[in-house]
Image (tube, coloured by chain):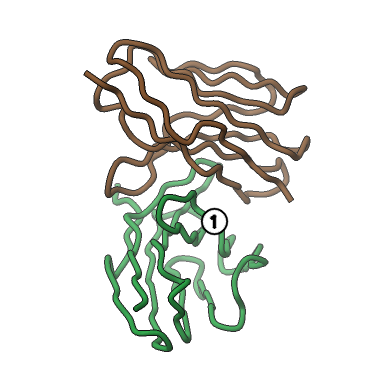
Amino acid sequence: EAGVTQSPRYAVLQEGQAVSFWCDPISGHDTLYWYQQPRDQGPQLLVYFRDEAVIDNSQLPSDRFSAVRPKGTNSTLKIQSAKQGDTATYLCASSLTGQEFFGPGTRLTVL
Amino acid sequence: GEKVEQHESTLSVREGDSAVINCTYTDTASSYFPWYKQEAGKSLHFVIDIRSNVDRKQSQRLTVLLDKKAKRFSLHITATQPEDSAIYFCAASLSNTNKVVFGTGTRLQVLP
């Protein structure tokens, strides 16, 4: 069974540029998470979905970040105008019964 | 909201010794406590979990203990091996939600 896949694996931007991250969860997993993991810190939840519905996006900076999961499968996380403070690894995870399976992450550097 | 604190930021043990990583949580309604391992340059990988209906769970060399009264849980690794070297994250979530809150991580180094 394929795991969680993410793309791109790396991204380097100038401040003010936009970027999108894509996640393909494990087939059949109804819950999908996006986390931000700054260097040397634990993952911090940005948003999570059950099927296509947003369940919690309270930690998502709504002025610049957006996330969608239109068909309850793949998901896209977008940063409209990146800031240096957004430099981190962005992790996608999926689950069905509680245990989360993580993708390899996208390492974002904002110069 | 829930907060999870990991008390040891780094831990060094000799190969073959035991290692213990401790975490505390704040929300008494938390009922699911997973542990994840992150090796250098890699993503998180599930290692073991415990639910609040038990106070101990073992899987091979790993044991998780849960003290609900103290809101404390711990990961015990016996007979440590070099491949156990990694960052370990504890986490907690409430029973009525899939939202998991992670600790800040403990870097375990197993020395030869």
As drawn, B50 above or below B101: above
Q: Residue at x 60, y 74 (%)?
A: A61
Image x and y of residue A98, in percent: 55, 42
Question: In terms of secondary structure, where does tag 1 sit?
Answer: strand
The chain ID associated with circle 1 is: A
Q: Residue at x 25, y 27 (%)?
A: B83
As drawn, B58 above or below A52: above
Image x and y of residue A1, in percent: 30, 47
**Front residue of this view, candidates B7 and A58:** B7
As drawn, B31 above or below B55: below
**How many numbered circles does the render carry?**
1
Q: Residue at x 37, y 71 (%)?
A: A22
The residue carrying mark 1 is: A44
Residue type at mark 1 is: Gln
* Left or right of B76 on screen, residue B97: right
Chain given the colour brown: B
Chain given the colour green: A
Image x and y of residue A105, in percent: 35, 59
Binning the other alpha carbons within 10 Å of mark 1 as few (below 14), some (14 to 19) or many (20 upward) gives some
Q: Quadrant of the C terminus of chain B?
A: top left
Q: Residue at x 57, y 69 (%)?
A: A52
Q: Which residue ends up furthest to the left in the rendered image?
A: B112
Image x and y of residue A8, in percent: 28, 70
